Every structure is written in structure tokens, then in C-alpha cells.
Amino acid sequence: MSIVPGTEGYAEYAEALANDWRKISFRDHHQPVLHLIPTTPSRILDVGAGMGRDAAALAAMGHSVVAVEPVDELRAAAINFYPASSVVWLDDSLPELCLVRESANTFNVVMVTAVWMHLDEVERRRGMNTISALLDEGGVVIMSLRHGPFPRGRRMFDVSAADTIRLAEGHHLHPLLNVCSGSAQQANRNMGVTWTRLAFRK
């Protein structure tokens, strides 16, 4: 079985990661960007949806949610943990999101949470083009970038907010938000990990 580049180190720790992520609520985790989530039912794509907390929360708000997760163990855990959710789960990944694009759907919001730093420079260029193509005019992309020491066994890159903004602007995505914060996870805070929240409108 081939492993999607950037997902190394997740399958074997899926259960522990899922339990850790569930300790932090959707609203607490996404407080800086909650004002960008539509209040009326919308089409939302959650890329790298992990164990499904965000996708399930968005679906519970009345949104139509497509959740993309290439790690089988995380995707299975999410489906089992949120069996009543209306989320549509896909085994897909950036930079191409082939299955999502085949569906010919576009979205009002694309969430890219804790994913972008797993892509190398070439993949980020292709990925931004993919995201822009899937976004409706007036739609919003919400991203988070991780900064600090990389966990052992993970494929990550040091990606700056400035570079991401320049790349987004080249794909008709205009900056709405650029906020830095500490990590919500104590272990990451202890290591000096910080995050940048970015949002763009097409």
C-alpha cells in the first residue's frame, strides 16, 4: 500500500492522535476564524480532516461537508466516532484532490487545517491552484501553518505566512486574516510550536 507523501507517522499513532484531538473542541480550536464560517447552510470542503471533529461540527451546523483524509486509520476512526454525521468522506489528498475534482463540485469554504506544511514547494504551488479551482467566487479558504520543531518521523517543511500569501494572491485569493498564536496542545507549547491562521477570499 502506497503512503501519500506528508502522511508518514500518522497511521501508526492514529488512535492516540484521535484521542488527543478530541480533547479540544471545534470552537476552541478555530476561535480566530469562526467569524468566517457562514451562518447559512453552505458547501464546505475539509482537507486533511483527520479524525473528523471539524467536519462533524460543521455538518451539525447545517453545512454540506465533504471531508478528505488519506490516512485510512484516521478516516475509519472518524466514521466510527461520528456514525450519525452527514459528512461525505473521501480517500483523497492534496495537491491534486482528484476525487473531489471528479465530482465537479465547488465550495463556499475550503478548510486546510494543519496540512500545508506537509507539502513541498512544488506541491504547494499545485495545491493552491487546485484549491482556487474548487472555490466559488466569493468563497473563503481558511488555512493554518505550523512553525517550530518537527516531530520525528513526520514529513514537514518550514512554510512562512508571507510565502503562502504571495502564492495565494497569484491564484486570485485575497488575504482576509493573518493571525499568529501558540499551540492548543500543551506538548507542542512546551516545544515552542506556534501557528499562523490565514484566510483568503476568491
Image (cartoon, grey):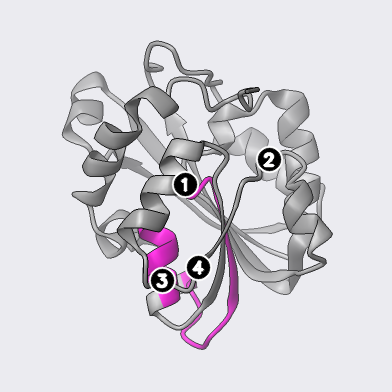
- Check residue 51 in the rendering and tell me which mark sits there, or answer none: none
Is 172 rendered above or below residue 77? below
Residue appearing at x 39%, y 66% in the figure? 56
Q: CA distance from mark 3 to mark 4?
A: 5 Å
For disc 1, the neighbor class at 10 Å (few under 14, some 14 to 19, many from 20) is: many
Q: Earlier in the sequence, mark 1 or mark 4?
A: 1
Is 186 rendered above or below residue 39? above
Residue appearing at x 73%, y 57% in the figure? 100
Which-is-in-front pick, marks 2 and 1? 1
Location of mark 2 (residue): 94
Which-is-in-front pick, marks 3 and 2? 3
Choose between 4 and 58: the one closer to the eye. Answer: 4
Location of mark 4 (residue): 87
Amino acid type, label 3: Ser
Residue appearing at x 54%, y 45% in the figure? 69
Quadrant of the image occupied by residue 138: bottom right
For disc 4, the neighbor class at 10 Å (few under 14, some 14 to 19, many from 20) is: many
Q: Residue 137 location, x and y as percent?
A: 77, 73
Callout 2 secondary element: loop
Q: CA distance from mark 2 to mark 4?
A: 19 Å
- Check residue 85 in the rendering and tell me which mark sits there, or answer none: 3
- Check residue 75 in the rendering and tell me which mark sits there, or answer none: 1
Q: Earlier in the sequence, mark 2 or mark 4?
A: 4
The residues colored magenta run 36-59
Q: CA distance from mark 1 to mark 4?
A: 11 Å
Q: Earlier in the sequence, mark 3 or mark 2?
A: 3
Which-is-in-front pick, marks 2 and 4? 4
Q: Residue 96 location, x and y as percent?
A: 77, 42
Amino acid type, label 4: Val
